[in-house]
Amino acid sequence: MSGQVRVWDPLLRIAHWTLVASILAAWIATEIKLDAAKRAHEWAGYAALAVIALRLAWGWTGPRYARFAQFVRPVSATLAYARALIAHTEPRYLGHNPLGGWAVVALLALSAAAGLTGWLSVTDRFWGVEWVQELHEALGNALYFLVGLHLAGVVFTSWRHRENLVLAMLTGRKPAARPGDID
Amino acid sequence: MKPRFFLVALALSGALVPFSAARATGLATCDSGSKEGWQSQEKLTAMLKDKGWQVRRIKEDGGCYEVYALNEKGERVEAYFHPRTLAPVPTGSKDHKG
């Protein structure tokens, strides 16, 4: 094996796993029928919102692979990548591949929307307002679905390029670019 | 073989959905029988209004009426009531008889 390179910076990794923990905690809390669990669910939501705000700021100011400009690609390039994926000719990306990049954007947007509607639902103004409650629940369910899709993408891409992407998000390191890879 | 692997991965995402499907929030359940004997939500609303509550939403949850309201002090409350008796049901109650 040739060497490993640092791709994911520490703040990005901490943000990623803190968001995972918040979403997981919020999900588990909805399954526990206790008043305390409702409060835990709320705090998990606030934690998620704080992490998302941090991640958005990092997406403009952070190091190379953390920047949205590095991994959010035009629709045309994303479709071309999807076609290559179907043909089993898709290149390996050192950072996020085009579909993975859009997954990041969608996951951040959905979890922010779920967090904000949850926050609204416990304000005096929107307390008990049906559309806010229903919207929050729908966003939550959509988020769980997208998390599943993200996991599927991670497993699939890890398998395709023979690298452990979960480990990479823990250590920050990935095998260096090989010929044909996109840096 | 490759598409099959992708299907397995996709199934991973599908597997998460049933867990998250909407369910009773279930802070209490009521032994309230058939809806024939239930009192109306309008009556409950009127009763709570008299107490100075501002009722925002009434849902059925676990056989109880689940009420979202601002109480007489303007505090947010989520309270359960028995559909037959309209008596308050403490949260944590199982099969409350009313």
Image (tube, helix red, strand yellow):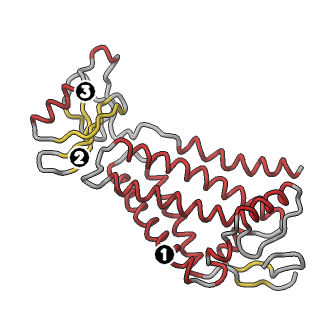
Vertically, is A151 above or below B43?
below
User: Is the residue marked by circle 3 packed among few (<14), some (14-19), or many (20+) residues within 10 Å?
Assistant: some
Disc with the residue nearer the chain's start (2 vs 3): 3
Q: Cα distance, mark 3 to mark 1?
A: 45 Å
Badge 1 amino acid: Leu
Point 37% across, 31% down: residue: B62
Point 43% across, 70% down: residue: A50
Image quadrant containing the N terminus of chain A: bottom right
Q: Position of residue A2 (x, y in %)?
A: 86, 84
Q: Which mark is residue A54?
A: 1
Point 24% across, 32% down: residue: B81
Question: Residue under mark 3: which chain is it in?
Answer: B
Q: Position of residue A81 (x, y in %)?
A: 79, 62
Q: Secondary structure at mark 3?
A: helix
Q: Which residue is mark 3?
A: B41
Image quadrant containing the C terminus of chain A: bottom right
Q: Position of residue A91 (x, y in %)?
A: 84, 69
